[in-house]
Image: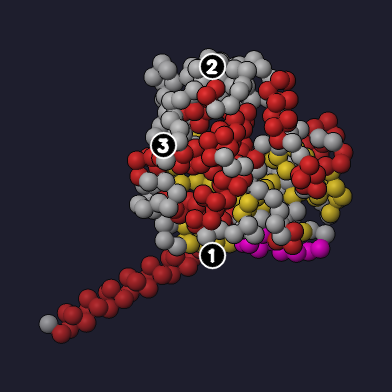
Amino acid sequence: MKTLLIFFVSLISFSTLLSTEEIVSKNEQVRQLLDDLSSANDPGIQYVIVDKNAVVFAHRAGLADIENKIPLSLEHTMAAFSMTKTLTAIAILQLVERGKIKLNSQVSQYVKHPYHSEITLRQLLSHTSGIPNPNPLTWIHFAGDHDDFDENAALSQVLADNPEPDASPGEEYGYSNIGYWLLGEIVETVSGQDYDEYVTKNIFEPLGLTRNEIGFQVSNRKQHAKGYLKKYSFMNLLKYFVLDEDVWGEYEGNWLHINNTILDGPAFGGAIGSAKAFSRILQDLLSEKSVLLEGKVKRYLFSQQKTHSGKSIDMTLGWHIEHTNGVRYYYKEGGGAGFRSEMRLYPDRGLASVMMVNRTSLNTRKQLNQLDSEFIK
Protein backbone atom coordinates (compact mmCIF):
# COMPACT_ATOMS: atom_id res chain seq x y z
CA MET A 1 0.00 0.00 0.00
CA LYS A 2 2.85 2.34 0.93
CA THR A 3 4.62 1.55 -2.36
CA LEU A 4 1.43 2.28 -4.33
CA LEU A 5 1.00 5.63 -2.55
CA ILE A 6 4.59 6.63 -3.34
CA PHE A 7 3.96 5.70 -7.00
CA PHE A 8 0.89 7.96 -7.26
CA VAL A 9 2.63 10.86 -5.50
CA SER A 10 5.56 10.51 -7.88
CA LEU A 11 3.22 10.38 -10.88
CA ILE A 12 1.43 13.57 -9.78
CA SER A 13 4.75 15.34 -9.19
CA PHE A 14 6.02 14.27 -12.62
CA SER A 15 2.82 15.49 -14.30
CA THR A 16 3.10 18.84 -12.52
CA LEU A 17 6.71 19.15 -13.62
CA LEU A 18 5.74 18.46 -17.22
CA SER A 19 2.91 21.02 -17.03
CA THR A 20 5.28 23.68 -15.64
CA GLU A 21 7.85 22.94 -18.33
CA GLU A 22 5.18 23.20 -21.02
CA ILE A 23 4.07 26.62 -19.69
CA VAL A 24 7.65 27.89 -19.60
CA SER A 25 8.27 26.60 -23.11
CA LYS A 26 5.06 28.20 -24.40
CA ASN A 27 5.88 31.55 -22.80
CA GLU A 28 9.37 31.53 -24.26
CA GLN A 29 7.94 30.78 -27.69
CA VAL A 30 5.53 33.72 -27.44
CA ARG A 31 8.32 36.02 -26.23
CA GLN A 32 10.41 35.04 -29.23
CA LEU A 33 7.52 35.76 -31.62
CA LEU A 34 7.09 39.21 -30.09
CA ASP A 35 10.82 39.95 -30.18
CA ASP A 36 10.85 39.01 -33.85
CA LEU A 37 8.02 41.50 -34.53
CA SER A 38 9.94 44.41 -33.01
CA SER A 39 13.71 44.36 -33.31
CA ALA A 40 16.03 46.41 -31.11
CA ASN A 41 15.93 49.34 -33.59
CA ASP A 42 12.21 49.35 -34.39
CA PRO A 43 9.09 50.78 -32.75
CA GLY A 44 7.79 48.62 -29.95
CA ILE A 45 4.99 46.27 -29.06
CA GLN A 46 3.04 45.54 -25.87
CA TYR A 47 1.18 42.27 -25.45
CA VAL A 48 -0.83 41.29 -22.38
CA ILE A 49 -3.13 38.34 -21.80
CA VAL A 50 -5.23 38.06 -18.65
CA ASP A 51 -7.91 36.04 -16.94
CA LYS A 52 -10.39 37.60 -14.52
CA ASN A 53 -7.97 37.42 -11.60
CA ALA A 54 -4.44 37.89 -12.89
CA VAL A 55 -2.04 38.64 -15.69
CA VAL A 56 -1.40 35.32 -17.46
CA PHE A 57 1.39 36.66 -19.66
CA ALA A 58 2.87 40.08 -20.47
CA HIS A 59 5.78 41.06 -22.67
CA ARG A 60 7.18 44.10 -24.43
CA ALA A 61 9.72 44.51 -27.20
CA GLY A 62 11.24 47.28 -29.32
CA LEU A 63 11.55 51.00 -28.67
CA ALA A 64 9.33 53.79 -27.36
CA ASP A 65 11.75 56.38 -28.75
CA ILE A 66 14.04 55.39 -31.62
CA GLU A 67 16.12 58.57 -31.63
CA ASN A 68 17.04 58.24 -27.94
CA LYS A 69 17.06 54.42 -27.88
CA ILE A 70 14.47 54.24 -25.09
CA PRO A 71 13.00 50.73 -24.77
CA LEU A 72 9.22 50.45 -24.75
CA SER A 73 7.99 49.37 -21.32
CA LEU A 74 4.66 47.87 -20.32
CA GLU A 75 3.87 51.23 -18.67
CA HIS A 76 4.28 53.38 -21.80
CA THR A 77 1.01 54.82 -23.11
CA MET A 78 -0.08 54.93 -26.75
CA ALA A 79 -3.05 56.27 -28.71
CA ALA A 80 -5.76 53.59 -28.73
CA PHE A 81 -7.93 55.20 -31.42
CA SER A 82 -11.07 53.13 -32.12
CA MET A 83 -10.57 50.81 -29.14
CA THR A 84 -12.16 53.80 -27.37
CA LYS A 85 -15.52 52.92 -28.90
CA THR A 86 -15.96 50.02 -26.49
CA LEU A 87 -15.43 52.45 -23.59
CA THR A 88 -18.15 54.64 -25.10
CA ALA A 89 -20.47 51.63 -25.30
CA ILE A 90 -19.80 50.83 -21.64
CA ALA A 91 -20.57 54.45 -20.70
CA ILE A 92 -23.90 54.35 -22.57
CA LEU A 93 -24.82 51.00 -20.99
CA GLN A 94 -24.03 52.39 -17.53
CA LEU A 95 -26.53 55.16 -18.17
CA VAL A 96 -29.06 52.54 -19.31
CA GLU A 97 -28.41 50.58 -16.11
CA ARG A 98 -29.02 53.71 -14.02
CA GLY A 99 -32.32 54.40 -15.76
CA LYS A 100 -31.09 57.62 -17.38
CA ILE A 101 -31.69 56.50 -20.99
CA LYS A 102 -33.21 53.62 -22.95
CA LEU A 103 -31.54 51.74 -25.81
CA ASN A 104 -34.55 52.13 -28.09
CA SER A 105 -34.87 55.87 -27.47
CA GLN A 106 -34.39 58.12 -30.46
CA VAL A 107 -31.03 59.86 -30.65
CA SER A 108 -32.78 63.14 -31.49
CA GLN A 109 -34.13 63.26 -27.93
CA TYR A 110 -30.61 64.00 -26.72
CA VAL A 111 -28.63 65.58 -29.58
CA LYS A 112 -29.41 67.33 -32.85
CA HIS A 113 -28.33 65.63 -36.08
CA PRO A 114 -29.30 65.83 -39.78
CA TYR A 115 -30.10 62.13 -40.26
CA HIS A 116 -33.29 60.03 -39.92
CA SER A 117 -35.24 61.11 -36.84
CA GLU A 118 -36.01 57.51 -35.86
CA ILE A 119 -32.36 56.46 -35.35
CA THR A 120 -31.99 54.87 -31.91
CA LEU A 121 -29.14 54.54 -29.43
CA ARG A 122 -29.09 50.78 -30.06
CA GLN A 123 -28.49 51.41 -33.76
CA LEU A 124 -25.62 53.79 -33.05
CA LEU A 125 -23.99 51.19 -30.78
CA SER A 126 -24.36 48.39 -33.34
CA HIS A 127 -23.39 50.50 -36.38
CA THR A 128 -26.80 50.00 -38.01
CA SER A 129 -27.90 53.65 -37.95
CA GLY A 130 -27.19 54.34 -41.62
CA ILE A 131 -25.04 57.35 -40.67
CA PRO A 132 -22.14 57.79 -43.12
CA ASN A 133 -18.48 57.22 -42.34
CA PRO A 134 -16.34 59.77 -44.21
CA ASN A 135 -12.56 59.59 -43.88
CA PRO A 136 -11.76 60.81 -40.33
CA LEU A 137 -8.00 61.29 -40.78
CA THR A 138 -8.26 65.08 -40.77
CA TRP A 139 -10.45 65.21 -37.64
CA ILE A 140 -7.47 65.96 -35.44
CA HIS A 141 -5.78 68.84 -33.65
CA PHE A 142 -2.36 69.22 -32.06
CA ALA A 143 -1.98 68.32 -28.42
CA GLY A 144 -0.67 71.79 -27.66
CA ASP A 145 -3.87 73.36 -29.05
CA HIS A 146 -6.28 71.21 -27.03
CA ASP A 147 -7.19 73.78 -24.36
CA ASP A 148 -8.55 76.12 -27.05
CA PHE A 149 -10.23 73.41 -29.13
CA ASP A 150 -14.03 73.62 -29.61
CA GLU A 151 -15.35 70.07 -30.00
CA ASN A 152 -18.98 71.15 -30.54
CA ALA A 153 -17.96 73.38 -33.43
CA ALA A 154 -15.89 70.57 -34.96
CA LEU A 155 -18.78 68.09 -34.77
CA SER A 156 -21.22 70.63 -36.18
CA GLN A 157 -18.92 71.14 -39.16
CA VAL A 158 -18.59 67.39 -39.78
CA LEU A 159 -22.37 66.97 -39.65
CA ALA A 160 -22.84 69.92 -42.03
CA ASP A 161 -20.29 68.47 -44.47
CA ASN A 162 -21.84 64.97 -44.37
CA PRO A 163 -25.61 65.36 -43.99
CA GLU A 164 -26.77 62.47 -46.18
CA PRO A 165 -27.28 58.97 -44.69
CA ASP A 166 -25.91 55.89 -46.38
CA ALA A 167 -28.91 53.71 -45.51
CA SER A 168 -32.16 53.66 -43.59
CA PRO A 169 -31.90 52.98 -39.85
CA GLY A 170 -31.66 49.27 -39.01
CA GLU A 171 -31.36 48.27 -42.66
CA GLU A 172 -27.73 47.12 -42.68
CA TYR A 173 -24.40 47.23 -40.88
CA GLY A 174 -22.28 50.27 -41.71
CA TYR A 175 -19.36 51.35 -39.54
CA SER A 176 -19.59 55.00 -38.49
CA ASN A 177 -17.20 57.16 -36.48
CA ILE A 178 -19.82 59.92 -36.55
CA GLY A 179 -22.28 57.57 -34.86
CA TYR A 180 -19.97 57.03 -31.90
CA TRP A 181 -19.11 60.73 -31.76
CA LEU A 182 -22.84 61.35 -31.30
CA LEU A 183 -22.90 58.73 -28.52
CA GLY A 184 -20.25 60.74 -26.72
CA GLU A 185 -22.46 63.82 -26.99
CA ILE A 186 -25.32 61.80 -25.49
CA VAL A 187 -23.12 60.81 -22.55
CA GLU A 188 -22.44 64.51 -21.95
CA THR A 189 -26.09 65.56 -22.30
CA VAL A 190 -27.42 62.90 -19.95
CA SER A 191 -24.63 62.91 -17.34
CA GLY A 192 -23.95 66.63 -17.30
CA GLN A 193 -20.22 65.89 -17.52
CA ASP A 194 -17.68 66.18 -20.30
CA TYR A 195 -17.22 62.82 -22.01
CA ASP A 196 -13.63 62.35 -20.86
CA GLU A 197 -14.54 63.33 -17.30
CA TYR A 198 -17.44 60.86 -17.23
CA VAL A 199 -15.30 57.97 -18.51
CA THR A 200 -12.51 58.81 -16.06
CA LYS A 201 -14.88 58.92 -13.07
CA ASN A 202 -17.06 55.96 -14.02
CA ILE A 203 -14.72 53.56 -15.83
CA PHE A 204 -11.06 54.29 -15.07
CA GLU A 205 -11.18 55.33 -11.41
CA PRO A 206 -13.47 52.50 -10.20
CA LEU A 207 -10.83 50.09 -11.52
CA GLY A 208 -8.01 51.97 -9.81
CA LEU A 209 -6.54 53.25 -13.07
CA THR A 210 -4.66 56.55 -12.84
CA ARG A 211 -4.29 59.33 -15.40
CA ASN A 212 -0.70 58.21 -15.97
CA GLU A 213 -2.03 54.81 -17.08
CA ILE A 214 -5.00 55.83 -19.21
CA GLY A 215 -6.87 58.99 -20.15
CA PHE A 216 -7.57 61.32 -23.05
CA GLN A 217 -4.41 63.42 -22.99
CA VAL A 218 -0.74 62.60 -22.50
CA SER A 219 -0.34 62.95 -18.75
CA ASN A 220 3.34 62.02 -18.57
CA ARG A 221 5.37 62.74 -21.71
CA LYS A 222 8.28 60.61 -20.51
CA GLN A 223 5.90 57.65 -20.30
CA HIS A 224 4.24 58.18 -23.69
CA ALA A 225 5.66 56.33 -26.70
CA LYS A 226 6.40 58.17 -29.93
CA GLY A 227 4.29 57.17 -32.91
CA TYR A 228 6.01 56.14 -36.17
CA LEU A 229 5.45 55.52 -39.87
CA LYS A 230 7.80 53.24 -41.80
CA LYS A 231 10.12 55.22 -44.08
CA TYR A 232 9.91 52.80 -46.99
CA SER A 233 6.14 52.40 -47.25
CA PHE A 234 3.32 53.37 -49.59
CA MET A 235 1.73 55.48 -46.87
CA ASN A 236 4.92 57.50 -46.50
CA LEU A 237 4.84 58.38 -50.20
CA LEU A 238 1.29 59.72 -49.85
CA LYS A 239 1.58 61.34 -46.43
CA TYR A 240 1.33 64.98 -47.59
CA PHE A 241 -1.89 64.19 -49.47
CA VAL A 242 -3.40 62.77 -46.29
CA LEU A 243 -2.38 65.11 -43.46
CA ASP A 244 -0.85 68.56 -43.07
CA GLU A 245 2.93 68.71 -43.17
CA ASP A 246 3.05 69.93 -39.54
CA VAL A 247 1.90 66.47 -38.43
CA TRP A 248 5.03 64.83 -39.77
CA GLY A 249 8.19 64.98 -37.67
CA GLU A 250 11.75 63.92 -38.43
CA TYR A 251 13.15 60.60 -39.63
CA GLU A 252 14.67 58.43 -36.94
CA GLY A 253 16.52 55.63 -38.69
CA ASN A 254 14.07 53.84 -40.98
CA TRP A 255 11.04 55.41 -39.27
CA LEU A 256 9.27 58.79 -39.53
CA HIS A 257 8.19 60.24 -36.20
CA ILE A 258 4.59 61.53 -36.17
CA ASN A 259 3.91 64.51 -33.91
CA ASN A 260 1.36 64.12 -31.11
CA THR A 261 -2.21 64.89 -32.14
CA ILE A 262 -5.62 64.44 -30.47
CA LEU A 263 -8.76 63.29 -32.23
CA ASP A 264 -11.51 65.90 -32.44
CA GLY A 265 -14.07 63.39 -31.13
CA PRO A 266 -12.83 61.60 -28.00
CA ALA A 267 -15.77 59.18 -27.96
CA PHE A 268 -14.88 57.56 -31.28
CA GLY A 269 -11.15 57.26 -30.74
CA GLY A 270 -9.52 59.53 -28.16
CA ALA A 271 -8.29 57.21 -25.39
CA ILE A 272 -4.57 57.07 -24.63
CA GLY A 273 -3.30 54.25 -22.46
CA SER A 274 -1.15 51.15 -22.07
CA ALA A 275 -2.04 47.56 -22.90
CA LYS A 276 -1.90 46.84 -19.15
CA ALA A 277 -4.52 49.52 -18.47
CA PHE A 278 -6.88 48.19 -21.13
CA SER A 279 -6.39 44.65 -19.82
CA ARG A 280 -7.74 45.78 -16.43
CA ILE A 281 -10.98 46.82 -18.13
CA LEU A 282 -11.17 43.45 -19.87
CA GLN A 283 -10.57 41.62 -16.59
CA ASP A 284 -13.57 43.39 -15.10
CA LEU A 285 -15.76 42.39 -18.04
CA LEU A 286 -14.65 38.75 -17.57
CA SER A 287 -15.63 38.85 -13.90
CA GLU A 288 -18.99 37.55 -12.69
CA LYS A 289 -19.21 40.62 -10.46
CA SER A 290 -18.22 43.45 -12.77
CA VAL A 291 -17.52 46.82 -11.19
CA LEU A 292 -18.51 48.56 -14.41
CA LEU A 293 -21.76 46.85 -15.40
CA GLU A 294 -24.24 44.57 -13.65
CA GLY A 295 -25.04 41.24 -15.27
CA LYS A 296 -28.28 42.02 -17.11
CA VAL A 297 -26.92 45.11 -18.85
CA LYS A 298 -23.44 43.63 -19.35
CA ARG A 299 -25.04 40.90 -21.48
CA TYR A 300 -25.79 43.53 -24.12
CA LEU A 301 -22.03 43.70 -24.73
CA PHE A 302 -22.11 40.03 -25.76
CA SER A 303 -25.48 39.77 -27.55
CA GLN A 304 -25.27 39.50 -31.33
CA GLN A 305 -27.39 42.12 -33.07
CA LYS A 306 -29.71 41.90 -36.09
CA THR A 307 -31.01 44.18 -38.80
CA HIS A 308 -34.70 44.97 -39.13
CA SER A 309 -35.04 42.08 -41.58
CA GLY A 310 -33.70 39.64 -38.97
CA LYS A 311 -30.25 39.19 -40.51
CA SER A 312 -27.55 38.65 -37.90
CA ILE A 313 -24.55 40.96 -38.04
CA ASP A 314 -21.12 40.40 -36.51
CA MET A 315 -21.70 43.10 -33.88
CA THR A 316 -22.88 43.40 -30.29
CA LEU A 317 -23.61 46.72 -28.61
CA GLY A 318 -19.95 47.63 -28.46
CA TRP A 319 -17.89 44.73 -29.87
CA HIS A 320 -17.26 43.12 -33.23
CA ILE A 321 -17.55 39.31 -33.35
CA GLU A 322 -15.07 36.89 -34.93
CA HIS A 323 -13.73 33.35 -34.60
CA THR A 324 -10.22 31.92 -34.51
CA ASN A 325 -9.45 28.21 -34.38
CA GLY A 326 -13.17 27.61 -33.84
CA VAL A 327 -13.29 29.87 -30.77
CA ARG A 328 -15.60 32.90 -30.75
CA TYR A 329 -14.14 36.19 -29.57
CA TYR A 330 -15.22 39.80 -29.23
CA TYR A 331 -12.81 42.45 -30.40
CA LYS A 332 -12.16 46.11 -31.12
CA GLU A 333 -9.30 47.38 -33.26
CA GLY A 334 -7.79 50.83 -33.27
CA GLY A 335 -5.46 52.52 -35.72
CA GLY A 336 -4.31 55.92 -36.89
CA ALA A 337 -1.29 58.14 -37.24
CA GLY A 338 1.58 56.40 -35.49
CA PHE A 339 -0.24 53.68 -33.56
CA ARG A 340 -2.12 50.41 -33.97
CA SER A 341 -3.97 48.29 -31.40
CA GLU A 342 -6.48 45.53 -30.81
CA MET A 343 -8.13 44.04 -27.74
CA ARG A 344 -10.10 40.80 -27.48
CA LEU A 345 -12.33 38.91 -25.09
CA TYR A 346 -12.66 35.11 -25.13
CA PRO A 347 -15.49 34.59 -22.61
CA ASP A 348 -15.70 30.82 -23.23
CA ARG A 349 -12.02 30.52 -22.32
CA GLY A 350 -12.09 33.11 -19.54
CA LEU A 351 -9.27 35.04 -21.22
CA ALA A 352 -8.66 38.43 -22.80
CA SER A 353 -5.74 39.93 -24.74
CA VAL A 354 -4.44 43.35 -25.76
CA MET A 355 -1.80 44.29 -28.31
CA MET A 356 -0.58 47.86 -28.81
CA VAL A 357 2.22 49.09 -31.11
CA ASN A 358 3.67 52.52 -31.84
CA ARG A 359 3.67 52.19 -35.60
CA THR A 360 0.93 52.96 -38.09
CA SER A 361 0.78 49.55 -39.75
CA LEU A 362 0.71 46.08 -38.23
CA ASN A 363 -1.67 43.21 -38.94
CA THR A 364 -2.88 42.85 -35.37
CA ARG A 365 -5.52 40.28 -36.31
CA LYS A 366 -2.93 37.95 -37.82
CA GLN A 367 -0.52 38.40 -34.92
CA LEU A 368 -3.14 37.94 -32.20
CA ASN A 369 -4.54 34.85 -33.92
CA GLN A 370 -1.09 33.32 -33.67
CA LEU A 371 -0.17 34.57 -30.19
CA ASP A 372 -3.53 34.02 -28.51
CA SER A 373 -3.82 30.50 -29.89
CA GLU A 374 -1.01 29.47 -27.52
CA PHE A 375 -3.25 30.33 -24.55
CA ILE A 376 -6.79 29.45 -25.73
CA LYS A 377 -6.09 25.89 -26.89
Estimate how packed mark 2 is, as few (under 14), some (14 to 19) or many (20 or more) residues with alpha carbons within 10 Å. few
Give the amino acid at mark 2.
Ser
Element class at badge 1 = helix
Element class at badge 3 = loop
Which residue is depicted at the point 85% across and 47% down?
249
Looking at the rendered structure, which numbered label has been put on residue 117?
2
Estimate the x, y position of residue 154 in percent, counting from the top left: 73, 31
Q: Foreground mark, 3 or 2? A: 3
Disc 3: which residue: 99
Which residue is depicted at the point 41% across and 61% down?
53
Magenta stretch, residue numbers: 68-76
Whether residue 238 is visible, yes or no, is no
Q: CA distance from mark 3 to mark 2?
A: 22 Å
- Classify residue 30 by image quadrant: bottom right
Which residue is depicted at the point 56% across and 20% down?
130
Whether residue 203 is visible, yes or no, is yes
Element class at badge 2 = loop
Estimate how packed mark 1 is, as few (under 14), some (14 to 19) or many (20 or more) residues with alpha carbons within 10 Å. few
Q: Foreground mark, 2 or 1? A: 2
Disc 1: which residue: 28
